[in-house]
Amino acid sequence: MLRNTSKCEQKILIVDDDKFVLQILTKILEKAGCSVTAVETGQEALTKLQTQTYDAAIIDVRLQDTNGLDLLNRIEKIAPDMTKIMLTGYPSDQDRIRALQQGADYYLAKPIKSETLIEIIERRCKSC
């Protein structure tokens, strides 16, 4: 059962070129009390990061405009303290190792259980 974390709202950036995945993740996280910004490209993510700060980013490994691991590397330089969650429909040990070496806190395979995602976000919450 998901617990409502609205008293400890987290700002989450989701980067995935699949609109359905964006909708589902947004719904899950908003229900848990998070403030969500959902974008479809790596460029949009970088633009958002220039003007806003986020507690966590959920980044698809395969994006249409860039490799999610390359995006992770750029995000790590911009926001090293932000929790970075890599999400993929095509898990591989090579990508997992690269992601963790480049600053990812988590490397998760789709489909992800909503409970797992909420648990990770709740761990990020420092004031709960």
Image: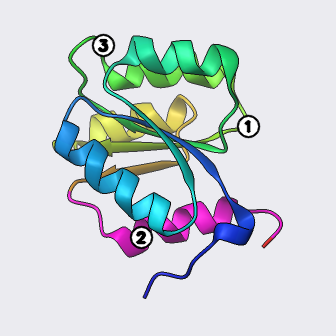
Tag 1 residue? 81
Q: Earlier in the sequence, mark 1 or mark 2?
A: 1
The quadrant of the picture occupied by the C terminus is bottom right
The residue at the far bottom in this view is: 1
Name the disc covering residue 24, or none.
none
Q: Position of residue 36 (x, y in %)?
A: 51, 45
Tag 2 residue? 116
Name the disc covering residue 66, or none.
3
Q: Position of residue 67 (x, y in %)?
A: 30, 18
- Residue positioned 63% across, 72% down in the render: 5
Question: Which secondary structure lies at badge 3?
Answer: loop
Coloring scheme of the render?
rainbow
Establish if 13 lies above or below 63.
below
Establish if 126 lies above or below 84.
below
Cα–Cα span, label 1 and label 2: 21 Å
- Residue positioned 43% across, 16% down in the render: 44
Establish if 99 lies above or below 93.
above
Q: Amino acid at mark 2?
A: Thr
Q: Amino acid at mark 1?
A: Asp
Q: Earlier in the sequence, mark 3 or mark 1?
A: 3
Q: Earlier in the sequence, mark 2 or mark 3?
A: 3
